[in-house]
Amino acid sequence: MSTATVVGGGPAGLIAAETLARAGVDVTVVDRMPSVPRKFMLAGHGGLNITHSEDRAAFLTRYGASAVRLAPMLDVFGPADLRAWCAELGEPTFVGTSGRVFPQSFRATPLVRAWLGRLAEQGVRLERRQRWTGWADDGALRFTGADGAALTTEQDVVVLALGGASWARLGSDGGWVDAFVGRGIEVTPMQPANVGVRVAWSETFAERFAGAPLKSVALSVRGAGGAPARGDAMVTRAGLEGGPVYAIGAPVRAALAVGTCVIEVDLRPEMSVAHLADRLDRRRPKDSASTWLRRALNLDPVGASLLREAGPVPTDPAAVAALVKAVPVQVSATAGIEKAISSAGGVRWSQVDEHLMLHTVPGTFVAGEMLDWEAPTGGYLLQASFATGVVAAQGALAWLHAGR
């Protein structure tokens, strides 16, 4: 019987293990944490958003430049496949009002319990509290146990699903990068993704509106192009957070890397500048600026105050309309990777083939967030992690069947 070691007990690693075991391979999963899959469980703490229901074309845009490489993998194991897999485990899914997909129980625990039970039935072994530390001179995998003892293992194929560099306390700390670089494998430096941005609000604005939502806005990075990200953003004392902020993370980082970054907030994305100007042109003589904005545009206090953060509110209706459609917010930085939901960067696509096998380490495949891709929240992260795990396992099976 062929043997496989899967390093990493997150979604990518476990689905790879399941795919291999289902084909009759003797599989061992090794993870540095005392239980698995920890980050997956945390993701389901407030409701497990496992994938998204939007059409394929829109779905692929969420992966930016990596969509070209991920598209065929999402054809192998896409949203419909993931939903069917959940149902097989006794957790049918439903589509929420936002198009996001959730298990019927809305939580990760029942799904994980059923999944680990299935893996046990398939004979998959879980070895916990062992940190992967790289390769021995003969190519064997090296580990350090909880007691500090050094261990090595040999196997026919390997799937590495070591995660990104966010949520270190849950096991994803990017500690594998040095071993890869030392082996000559190119890795794009890890950066925070799906993370808030830092803004130097006035003390008055920060004190009054920290924790207040900017509802139904659209955000874009000045000069970056691309479609604005829509949704609810959250004001914090230090800046902005929330889905639309996370969705523009890549252009934010790109702008900061070369100089300054200005996010433009469209407070009324459903209205044109001309429509706004027409409504603002009906100002009553005695209306204050706040009353004028509230009556004409139904702007709430946080929206009206955000306009003032950009400077004195103009009196000309056309100028105010233009400002409402693009309130400038100067970003000084992103929050640190320790605050990030996920990370960008990882093993460069040039280092793996279409089956996710490392060119320089034959028989070793990589999957999940340790690859150089990123996506916004909304189910896209988990979907691609599952898809790459399946593809890596299928690549490993093809390698075995070829007798290599």
Image (tube, rainbow, N blue to C red):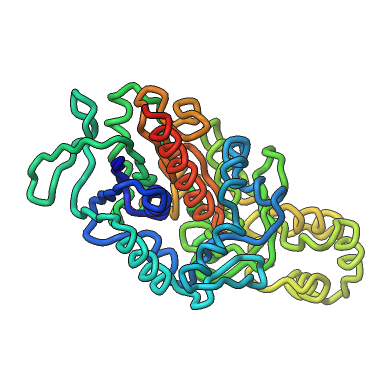
- Which quadrant is home to the C terminus? top left
In the foreground, 345 or 114: 114
Residue 179 coordinates in the image, percent (x, y)? 27, 31
Quarter residue 110 falls in: bottom left
Residue 25 visible here: yes
Quadrant location of the N terminus in the rendered image: top left
Return the x and y of residue 368 as percentages of the image width and height.
44, 45
**Residue 162 image offset from top left, x and y in percent:** 34, 44
Q: Is residue 340 left or right of residue 4?
A: right
Where residue 13 sits in the image (x, y, percent)?
37, 49
Residue located at (59% from left, 62% from top): 233
Q: Is residue 383 above or below residue 299?
A: above
Q: Residue at x 46, y 35 (%)?
A: 356
The residue closer to the viewer here, 183 or 323, is 183
Is 56 above or below relative to 94?
above
Is residue 337 in sight in this rendering? no
Left or right of residue 335, residue 214 in this image: right
Q: Is residue 317 left or right of residue 343?
A: right
Residue at the limit of the structure toward the front, as seen here = 1
Which of the 4 image quadrants contains residue 102? Answer: bottom right
